[in-house]
Image (spheres, rainbow, N blue to C red):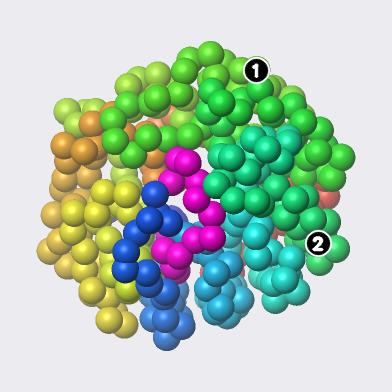
Amino acid sequence: MKKPVLLHYYITNRCNARCAFCGIWQEQPKADARLSDVAANLSHARAAGCRFVDFTGGEPLMHPDLPEFLRQAKKAGFITSVTTNCLLFEERVSELAGLIDLLHFSIDADDAELHNKIRGCQSYDKVMRSIDAALANRLYPDLLFTYTEENVDAVEGVWKLARKKRLLLILDPVFAIWGPDRVAPDAHRKAVDFAGRRGVYLNRAHLLLRGRGGNRTRDPLCRAVSSTIVITPDDKLTLPCYHHRCASVKIGGNLVEALKAGERLDALKKEGRYAFCEGCHINCYFDPTYQMMSGRFLWESMKGKAKYALTKYLLYGRPWPKMRG
């Protein structure tokens, strides 16, 4: 059995945005991860093989203990990742300096009106100020552009901003939790054309997967359970993924035992074969899955990651993430 590579840690389901394509902000009851649970789970997840931890939500900066979570993760040897809408970033940037290896700022347009409409909050100006605040604190955010038919034509201005600040632009196709890809082929074609420019990252394996019709339950590609450990704010190992939680295991300080639980072993057997897995193409679970494949999916994914690394760490000279152990 291959070891998981990624820990998706949902530290809160609270959010101060109301994004049109995300429903986590609507979840009830609200919950925040406890520091003692996070510290234990990080240690055990690293021992299980995880190399990356993505502290996510909700809006992760709404959790008061995020800096300590990050310190614990760095101490354990993780490469750390945080994506934020920037509403709280300016006031918390000094707490986060030196702790985030892969920082992503969500930006969906090159003008405030469209961006704020998509995000359901007044965050555009916050993103603009947060870019300078991050750079002043030696944090180098990628600009994460979630594209749809509605905003794909706004990518030009965001790319110009990224070039001016020597930042990477990530093109991420919006995904549907249920069923097949709903992004029009023309929007994907525009994204592919734009991805040829310097400083733009697009994992084309995502588009290859969607062109195939997503995951097929008769011939599954998904390895969400194998590749990723998913922990919810209430300290549960959730299965098979966060978006389709049909089973969970209370961790209670022993993630090692939770990973051996019958519920997880059953989820491994059913990986990619649940009824809701038909047509699935959720980016954050397939991204680590590609590393367990061979052929075009692996090739397209690695090509994109190589371009990302060459541009960010060699051309732009940003500090390379360090992982211990």
Between 28 and 205, the one nearer to me in the picture: 28
Residue 64, relative to residue 294: is it above or below? below
Residue 44, numbered label: none
Residue located 38% across and 56% down the image: 26
Determine the secondary structure under disc 1.
helix
Most foreground residue, 80 or 241: 241
Question: Which quadrant of the structure image shows residue 290?
Answer: top left
Q: Residue at x 37, y 35 (%)?
A: 176
* Residues rendered magenta in the picture: 8-22
Relative to 211, residue 243 above or below: below
The amino acid type found where label 2 is placed reads: Ala
Magenta-colored segment: predominant secondary structure: loop
* Image height of 265 relative to 269, above or below: below
Q: Tell me the residue that label 1 is attached to.
A: 193
Residue tagged by mark 2? 133
Q: Picture coordinates of residue 123 (x, y %)?
A: 66, 52
Query: Which residue is painted at 56% across and 78% down in the image?
Result: 64
- First reached walking from the N terminus: tag 1 or tag 2: 2
Left or right? Give the position of 317 relative to 206: right
Residue 142 is a magenta residue: no
